[in-house]
């Protein structure tokens, strides 16, 4: 592990963790600026419990030297599918590959918890997110040649390789050193 990699740690936290609020606020502000309406309500559409292990979900923060710089979550979509939600990178830390690390860690956790498929939607005015999911092997479930504005939310999926022994859904929160994608 390089010294740079040693500075990054993933932690599993509840939505109520104070380190989550600034990142979700910034994400809501960004959605609002891109879509022209208050999008903060979108971030509270699902109950916080859906992002906890007992309910089949997770919320991860990527910490750099103890400070949150990126994060993401998934919730149970169906018995075999986790839905990725709230993938974000703090505006001061973009263009460093952090979202790719978060997506990779969410995939790893979903796989260990027995999920076989990931599903997500992203907005038509988020070309960076669309690019991220295409670059990390997600299959678009829409016509990529169509104008995204005519489609609405852009759905993607990815099938996960099976693991021999899935974790139990009620795994306690973890802390894990982040590795390179």
Image: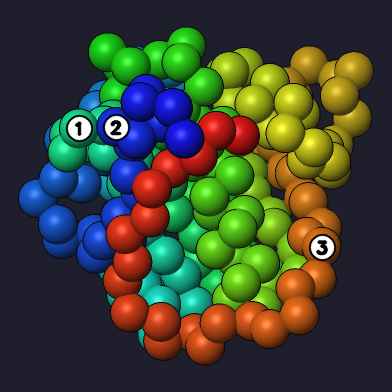
Q: Position of residue 8 (x, y in %)?
A: 33, 36
Is the residue 88 above or below the residue 166 in the image? above
At label 2, counting other C-alpha atoms closer than 10 Å, the crowd grade (few under 14, some 14-19, many 20 or more) is some
Q: Quadrant of residue 93?
A: top left
Secondary structure type for disc 1? loop
Identify the residue position indicated by label 3 in the image. 161
Which quadrant is home to the C terminus? top right
Does 139 sit above or below residue 176?
Answer: above
The numbered mark, 1 or 2, whose residue comes first in the sequence reads 2
Kindly tell me whether residue 146 is visible in this rendering. Answer: yes
Quadrant of residue 15 in the image? Answer: bottom left
Real-space Cα distance between discs 2 and 3? 29 Å
Spatial CA span between label 1 and label 2: 5 Å
Mark 3 closeness class: few <14, some 14–19, many ≥20 residues within 10 Å? few
For the view shown, which residue lies furthest in the left direction? Answer: 18
* Direction from residue 28 to residue 160 in the image, left or right: right
- Tell me how the rendering is colored: rainbow
Binning the other alpha carbons within 10 Å of mark 1 as few (below 14), some (14 to 19) or many (20 upward) gives few
31 left or right of 166?
A: left
Q: Could you say which quadrant of the image residue 53 lies in?
A: bottom left
2 or 3: tag closer to the N-terminus: 2
Q: Where is residue 124 drawn, in percent x and y?
A: 63, 24
Query: Which sits earlier in the primary sequence, circle 3 or circle 1?
Result: 1
Q: Is residue 141 left or right of residue 66?
A: right
Which residue is drawn at the image coordinates 17% and 38% (left, top)? 66
Q: Which mark is residue 65?
A: 1
20 or 98: nearer the viewer: 98
Which residue in the structure is indicated by mark 2? 7
Of circles 3 and 1, the one toward us is: 1
């Amino acid at each position: 592990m390089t010294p740079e990699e040693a500075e990054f740690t993933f932690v599993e936290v509840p939505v109520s963790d104070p380190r989550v609020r600034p990142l979700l606020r910034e994400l809501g502000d960004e959605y609002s600026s891109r879509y022209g309406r208050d999008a903060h309500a979108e971030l509270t559409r699902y109950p916080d419990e859906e992002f906890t292990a007992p309910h089949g979900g997770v919320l991860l923060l990527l910490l750099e030297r103890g400070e949150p710089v990126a994060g993401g979550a998934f919730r149970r979509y169906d018995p075999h599918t986790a839905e990725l939600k709230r993938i974000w990178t703090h505006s001061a830390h973009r263009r460093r590959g952090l979202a790719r690390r978060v997506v990779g860690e969410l995939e790893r956790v979903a796989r260990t918890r027995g999920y076989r498929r990931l599903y997500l939607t992203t907005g038509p005015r988020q070309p960076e997110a669309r690019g991220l999911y295409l670059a990390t092997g997600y299959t678009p479930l829409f016509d990529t040649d169509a104008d995204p504005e005519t489609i609405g939310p852009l759905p993607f999926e990815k099938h996960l390789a099976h693991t021999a022994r899935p974790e139990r859904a009620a795994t306690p929160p973890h802390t894990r050193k982040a590795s390179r994608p």
